[in-house]
Image (cartoon, rainbow, N blue to C red):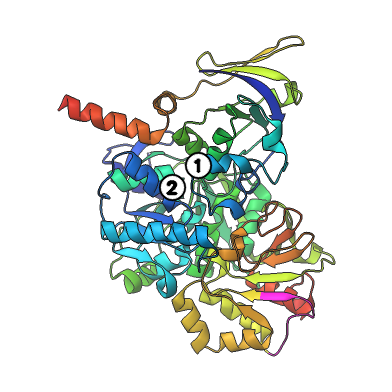
Amino acid sequence: MKFRGRVWKFGDNVDTDVIYPARHMNIHDPKQMGAHCMEDADPEFVRKIRPGDVIVAGENFGCGSSREHAPIAIREAGLSCVVARSFARIFYRNAFNMGLPIFESAELWDRVPEGAEIEVDGAAGTIRILGGEGETLAIQPIPPFMMELLKDGGLMNHLAKKRSAGKGGA
Amino acid sequence: MGLTITEKILLRHADLTEIRPGMLVNARVDVALGHDITAPIAIAEFRKAGGTKVFDPAKVVLVADHFTPNKDILSAGQVKILREFAREQGLTHYYEGGRCGVEHVLLHEKGIVVPGDVVIGADSHTCTYGALGAFATGVGSTDLAAVMMTGEAWLRVPESMEIVLKGRPGRWVSGKDVILHVIGRIGVDGALYKAMEFKGDGVSALSLADRLTMANMVIEAGAKSGIFAPDAVAEAYVRERAGRTGVLLDSDPDARYISRLEVDLDSLEPQVAFPHLPSNTRGIRDVGNVPVDQVYIGSCTNGRIEDLRIAASLLKGRKAAPGLRLIVVPTTPEVYGMALREGLLETFLAADAVIGPPTCGACLGGHMGILAEGERAVATTNRNFVGRMGHPKSEVYLANPAVAAASAVLGRIAGPDEL
C-alpha cells in the first residue's frame, strides 16, 4: 500500500461542507461527486490536482455531517490518500468503508511545503518527503481490522467476502 | 469495576460478559435510520452487496426530510428511491409528505426510540436520542447499508467524559446555551470519539427538549454520542409515546471517566457561536453590534414546540425589523399542529415571519432560506461552517430561540432583555 503524489495543504477543522458542499447532495452517482471536491475551499482545486496527489491537513479533518459524499469525492477526484493530524470520527469510519486510505501524522503538516512530493507507505508505516533532505517520518500503522477493510476495497466488499467465505465453510 | 451507562448498553447489545473502552464490538441495532440524502447511497450499496431483505422491516426507518418538499428533479428522484425501497421491503416506518418531519424530532415523537436502545443513523445528528438514555450515533451510508443487511454495527467502545451540571439556568438560558458553552470550552474536537455523559443536579432543571438539544449537538464537539441517564421525566415521555419504557440504566458510582467538566448553570448567560465554528462562542453581552439579514428558527436542534413557544412569547405584538427575513419552521406535523392551535403561527405571521413546512431545508443550505454572498443569519441550528446555509461568503451565528427572536425584532444580534 504505497502512494506517491504532490501535497495539497489545508488547515484545522476542514468540515464536510467544504469537502463536499450540501448543494450538490442531490447527486448520488459517485462518479459525479469528484468534480465538487474541496469546492468551497478552492473552486479550482479539482483542475489543479493530478491523480495520486495527497491532501495534508491539520486537526479534526472531516468534521461535521455524516455525508459519505465527502470521502467519495476525494477518492473520485483522483487523490490517493489523506494525511491529517487527526480525523473526525464519522469521516474516519466512512473513509475506510469507502476504501479511501487515511493516515494520522502529528508532524507532516509542519515539515512539508505545499506542492512537495511525498511517498506514503501504509504497510511499512512511513512517509518519505521526496527531494530536499529526503526526510522520512514514522506513522501509526493502520489497525488490522481497518487494514482488512481497505484490502477488500471497503466495507461492503468485505462483508460480501465474509458471507461467501461463511457459505463455503458451512 | 463499575460501568458507564454507555458501556452497559453496548455490553447488552454485543452479548459480552465484559467490556472496556477501546474494544471493537459488534452491537445489535434497534433502530437503523436513513434520509433522502444518505439512504439512496445506502440502498445502492445494500443491493450491490447482494442484499435482498432488510434485517427487520420494523427497525429500518426512512425519513425524507432533507431536500423536501422536493427542491428539484434530482431530489425528487432520491425520494423516489426511498419510497420504492420502503414499499418493496414493507417498512413500518417510512415518512414523506404531510406525515414527514425532521427525523430527530419525528422519531422520539413517534415513540420509535426508547431508553437502552442502540440507534445507528446515516445522519450525524443521530446522537440526539442520547437524551432518552439510548446509545445513538451517526454513521455514513455504507455503514447504514451494512446494518440494514445484518442488523449489527461494528463499534469501538468509546471512553466517557463526565459533564456535571450544577444549579439552575436563568430565564432565557436553555439547553442550547449549555451545549454551546461546553463546545466553546472543549473545542470542536474536544470530545473526539468520546461519549459525553451529562449528569448532576442541574439535569433535573432542564426540560427533555433542552436535553434533546444538548445531545443533538455533541457531534459538534466531535463526540461519538451524548447521553443522559433516563429520569422520571424521560420515562414518562417514552411511556406516553412508545407505550413502553425500554431498559432504564444508569452509570455505576465507580464507573470510569476519561475526564470531568463542571458547568455552573446559575451563572450561564445566553451564548452565540460566531462564524465559522460552533466552538467560537461568546456570551450575549460580549456580542457587540452585529446586524443580521435573516433569522431562522427551526431544525432538529431547536425546532420543537418548546422552542416555538419561547420565540412566540417574545415576538407577540412585535414585528421583524425592516429588511430582515424571519423564517420559522415547525419541525413536524405534530409541532405544526400544536403551534397552530396555540396561536403561535398567528403570532409569527403577525410578526412578518415566513412559516415554512417541516424540512431540514435551510439548516444545511439545501433550500427554503439560502443566504446570498455577504449575508448574515442568526440561526437556532447546529452548524455555522463556511457555506453552511448558502454562499461560501455568508455567515451563520448560532443561538437559542429567545436570542433569535430578539435579534429578529431588533435587526441585530440581541438578547431578549433588550426588548
Is B59 colored magenta in this rendering?
Answer: no
- Expressed as whole percent of the image width and height from the top left, the position of residue B398 reads 68, 62
Residue A88 is at least partly visible in this image: no
Per the picture, the main secondary structure of the magenta-coloured stretch is loop
Of the residues shown, which amino acid type is indicated by label 2? Ile
Residue B41: mark:
2
Name the image quarter holding residue B344: bottom right
Q: Residue at x 51, y 31 (%)?
A: A100
Residue B404, relative to residue A115: is it above or below?
Answer: below
Is B322 colored magenta in this rendering?
Answer: yes
Question: Do residues under tags 1 and 2 come within 8 Å of each other at their CB atoms?
Answer: yes
Q: Residue furthest front?
A: B73
Range shown magenta: B317-326
Residue A30: mark:
1
The crowd level at tag 1 (other Cα within 10 Å; few <14, some 14-19, many 20+) is: some
- Expressed as whole percent of the image width and height from the top left, the position of residue B213 reads 54, 63
Judge if badges 1 and 2 mark residues of a common chain.
no
